[in-house]
């Protein structure tokens, strides 16, 4: 069988990996692996979810969706999200410090 554009083998190239809403196709584990391989390609909706049925993460291009509380979510997802969130927070803090430092250095009277 062919591999799809995400590099997952065992599925025909015309099938979408993952699940979107009610139509489950492929493996939730493969989709979570794709998420952790490239988390910036996904919208993180955890902080602004208005409906619990709305996905926690949604792929920016394909629309594939992931739910942390999904019944097919692998057991290791929560611990990996904690690590990812910690790393992303550290990067964001570093960016903010750098921007703040650059902004204060460049204040010149006109």
Image (cartoon, helix red, strand yellow):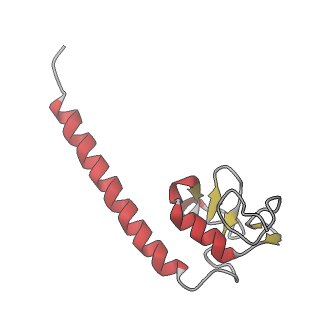
Question: Which residue occupies the foreground of this view, 52 or 17?
Answer: 17
Apparent side of residue 92 relative to residue 43 in the rendered image (left or right)? left
> Residue at position x 24%, y 41% from top?
100
Quarter-wise, where is residue 99 in the image? top left
Q: Looking at the rendering, in which quadrant would you find the C terminus?
A: top left
> Residue at position x 30%, y 48% from top?
95
Location of residue 32 with respect to 78 vertically, above or below: above
Apparent side of residue 51 relative to residue 98 in the rendered image (left or right)? right
- Percent across and percent down for residue 47 are 53, 62
The extreme bottom residue here reads 75
Location of residue 104 with respect to 84 vertically, above or below: above
How many numbered marks have been drawn onto this rendered protein structure? Answer: 0
Q: Looking at the rendering, in which quadrant would you find the N terminus?
A: bottom right
Apparent side of residue 75 relative to residue 27 in the rendered image (left or right)? left
> Residue at position x 78%, y 69% from top?
11
- Percent across and percent down for residue 48 are 58, 59
> Residue at position x 61%, y 82% from top?
74
Question: Which residue occupies the foreground of this view, 38 or 65?
Answer: 38
Apparent side of residue 32 relative to residue 21 in the rendered image (left or right)? left
- Percent across and percent down for residue 60 are 64, 51
The extreme top residue here reads 110
Question: Which residue occupies the foreground of this view, 89 or 25?
Answer: 25
């Amino acid at each position: 069988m062919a591999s799809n554009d995400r590099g997952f083998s065992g599925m025909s190239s015309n099938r979408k990996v993952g699940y979107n809403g009610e139509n489950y196709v492929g493996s939730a584990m493969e989709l979570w692996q794709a998420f952790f391989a490239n988390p910036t390609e996904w919208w993180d909706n955890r902080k602004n979810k208005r409906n619990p049925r709305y996905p926690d993460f949604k792929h920016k291009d394909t629309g594939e969706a992931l739910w942390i509380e999904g019944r097919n979510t692998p057991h290791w997802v929560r611990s990996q999200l904690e690590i990812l969130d910690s790393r992303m927070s550290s990067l964001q803090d570093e960016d903010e410090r750098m921007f703040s430092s650059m902004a204060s250095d460049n204040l010149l009277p006109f």
